[in-house]
Image (cartoon, rainbow, N blue to C red):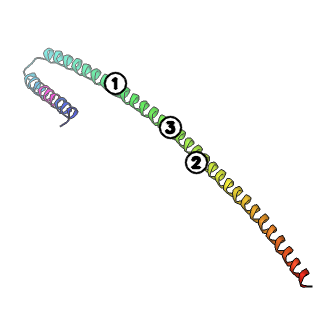
Amino acid sequence: MTEKTEKLKSMVQEKMTAARQQLENVKATVESSFDKTKTDLEQQLRQAKAGVDAKKLAAGKAKERLKAEAKEHKEMAKAKLHEMKETAVYKRGEKKKHKVTVRAEKAERHAQTSMDCAVVAIAEAELACLEACRARTEAEELVAKAK
């Protein structure tokens, strides 16, 4: 078992032992109360009420402490959740920026490649025009010689 489990087990055993002891004390008190006088019983009732009131007060304090701890834990959880959301929003924003940047760089490379292809196409067109002119010139020369 883990240390925390052992600690919990020990606390439960102590509380159960205390509860059994209290039950035995109550049993003895009630059994002996049948033989007491009215004034003794009233005294015993006052003591019992005082004991109950003290225990209620202690239990109330423990309950309030538990509520405060729960509230604090809830606030911490909310803060952590808020931080996680902010981090997630920030990361999504960074991811969007990265995606846009990557797309822009890809578009730039595509444009550069297209421009290079266009320059090559222009050069090929110039070459084709020059070859066409030479072919026309040769054809005209051959036609002129043939006459």
Q: Secondary structure at mark 2?
A: helix
* Residue tagged 3: 87
Instruction: State the SS at label 1.
Output: helix
Q: Of marks 1 and 2, which one's residue comes earlier in the chain?
A: 1
User: Which mark sits nearer the N-terminus, 2 or 3?
Assistant: 3
Kindly indicate the quadrant of the structure image that contains residue 4: top left
Residue at image coords 52%, 36%: 86
Q: Quadrant of the N terminus?
A: top left
Of residues 85 and 49, the one drawn nearer to the viewer in this rendering: 85
> Could you say which is closer to the camera, residue 38 or residue 44?
44
Q: Which residue is mark 2?
A: 99
Disc 1 versus disc 2: distance between alpha carbons? 50 Å
Determine whether, in the image, residue 128 is placed left or right of residue 87.
right
**Which numbered tag is attached to residue 65?**
1
Magenta range: 13-22
**Which residue in the rendered view is the most extreme toward the bottom?**
147
- Above or below: residue 145 compared with residue 62: below
Q: Position of residue 10 (x, y in %)?
A: 16, 30
Q: Amino acid at mark 3?
A: Thr
- Left or right: 127, with 55 as reference point: right
Crowd class of label 2 (few under 14; some 14 to 19; many from 20; radius 10 Å):
few
